[in-house]
Amino acid sequence: QLVESGGGLVQAGGSLRLSCAASGSTASINLMGWYRQAPGKKRELVASITSGGGRTNYADSVKGRFTISRDNAKNTMYLQMNSLKPEDTAVYYCNARTIVVLTTFDYWGQGTQVTVSS
């Protein structure tokens, strides 16, 4: 189970930190990430992080502004979002991916709304 928190309304230039708490078979998670979906648009990857936290990946649109991290002791992943822009407005989803042999299993949180006003 994945539970997001930390969304809200913020002015452009402001900051928010999203959290994703994982429960269940967390030891089997290979990759975690944040996705977002704006109205009328497809869900897109924002950032991802490997299970050990050693490798991260960011969408070009958020590089230099967002930072993904995870605390394995707390089974929690974070997304620090700085210098927010109105175009960052979306529902943000936490994702956990488990790979077993050649099969990928994706798990999703319920989403948290981020609204950036201009």
Image (cartoon, rainbow, N blue to C red):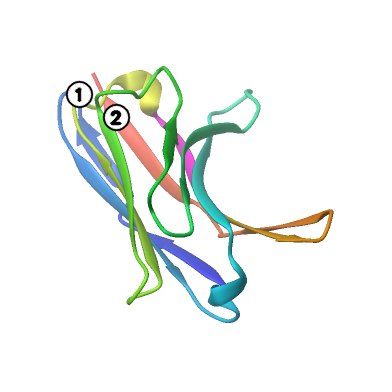
Query: Left or right of 108: which side holds 12?
Result: left
Q: Residue at x 33, y 76 (%)?
A: 74
- Marks 1 & 2, CB-CB < 8 Å contact: yes
Instruction: Give the answer, above or below, for where 74 lies relative to 53.
Output: below
For mark 2, give the secondary structure.
Answer: strand
For mark 1, give the secondary structure.
Answer: loop
Q: Residue at x 38, y 54 (%)?
A: 53
The crowding category of the residue bearing disc 2, from other C-alpha atoms within 10 Å (few below 14, some 14 to 19, many at least 20), is many
What amino acid is labelled 1 in the image? Ala
Instruction: Give the answer, above or below, for where 59 lies relative to 36.
Output: above
Q: Which residue is mark 2?
A: 116
Query: Where, by quadrant of the figure, is residue 45 drawn?
Result: top right
Q: Is residue 20 visible?
A: yes
What amino acid is labelled 2 in the image? Val
Q: Residue at x 62, y 33 (%)?
A: 43
Residue 99 rendering spot, x and y as whole percentages: 72, 58
Query: Where, by quadrant of the figure, is residue 60 drawn?
Result: top left
Front residue of 115/109: it is: 109
CA gap, disc 1 to disc 2?
A: 6 Å
Residue located farthest toward the bottom when viewing the structure as drawn: 24
Label the magenta part by its dominant secondary structure: strand
Q: Which residue is mark 1?
A: 12
- Residue 55 - label: none
Query: Where, by quadrant of the figure, is residue 114 drawn?
Result: top left
Front residue of 79/98: it is: 98
Which badge, 1 or 2, is on the more N-terminal residue?
Answer: 1
Magenta segment? 89-93
